[in-house]
């Protein structure tokens, strides 16, 4: 028994040493960009909107888990959680497209990418609007005031991200 315990301790120590060696051996900044490069205010704004959505979604999911399947509106509340998750992915995709576009330095490539970016921003904006509408419809019959309030914060986060994408799209002439 003591040998087994010692082997387990040695294995954990070896794993810890290997983990430290891996983290020390690889640079912290692997994406190929200059470590001093800064994201644009638009990218930062979308990051902030995504962070707000994630926080509100986490709060909603905690309440949903505490209610469990005993809630009479569990299916509708699950739709709200799904819409929040979808919105998080859509915003992250928009951030990626916008950041890539902003880093482009070749004008012909930027011109071509601008059309794709406008298309994606329009698609994501429409999808976020649709997800916000799903939430509004789902919460119309919600009985729990806390779930309703939390759900409406998620809806407002989605609409704020949609408005930002519409604004970005309008600015890309």
Image: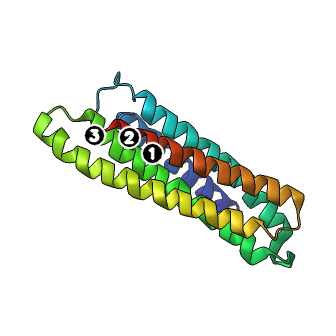
- Separation of marks 2 and 3 at Cα, in angstroms: 15 Å
Say which residue appears at 29% left-offset and 34% top-offset: 102
SS for callout 3: helix
In this orientation, which residue lies closer to the viewer: 102 or 12?
A: 102
In this orientation, which residue lies closer to the viewer: 170 or 11?
A: 170
Numbered mark located on residue 101 in the image:
3
Location of the C terminus (image quadrant): top left
- Separation of marks 1 and 2 at Cα, in angstroms: 6 Å
Q: Is residue 163 visible?
A: yes
SS for callout 1: helix
- Residue 17 in the image: state x and y as whole percent: 48, 42
Indicate left or right for 163 with 39 as reference: right
Q: Report the residue marked by disc 2.
A: 170
- Residue 156 in the image: state x and y as whole percent: 66, 49
**Viewer-side label of 3, 1:** 1
Q: How packed is label 1: few (under 14 Cα within 10 Å), some, or many (20 or more)?
A: some
Q: How packed is label 3: few (under 14 Cα within 10 Å), some, or many (20 or more)?
A: some
SS for callout 2: helix
Earlier-in-chain disc, 2 versus 3 = 3
Q: Report the residue marked by disc 1.
A: 166
């Amino acid at each position: 028994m003591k040998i087994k315990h010692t082997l387990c301790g040695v294995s954990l120590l070896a794993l810890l040493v290997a983990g430290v060696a891996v983290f020390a051996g690889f640079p912290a900044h692997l994406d190929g960009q200059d470590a001093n490069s800064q994201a644009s205010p638009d990218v930062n704004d979308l990051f902030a909107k995504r962070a707000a959505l994630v926080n509100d979604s986490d709060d909603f999911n905690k309440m949903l888990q505490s209610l469990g399947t005993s809630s009479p509106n569990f299916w509708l509340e699950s739709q709200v959680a799904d819409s929040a998750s979808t919105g998080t992915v859509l915003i992250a995709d928009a951030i990626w497209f916008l950041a890539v576009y902003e880093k482009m330095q070749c004008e012909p490539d930027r011109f071509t990418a601008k059309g794709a970016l406008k298309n994606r921003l329009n698609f994501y904006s429409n999808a976020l609007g649709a997800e916000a509408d799903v939430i509004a419809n789902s919460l119309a019959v919600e009985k729990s005031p806390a779930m309703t309030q939390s759900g409406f914060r998620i809806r407002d986060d989605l609409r704020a991200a949609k408005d930002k994408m519409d604004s970005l799209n309008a600015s890309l002439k």
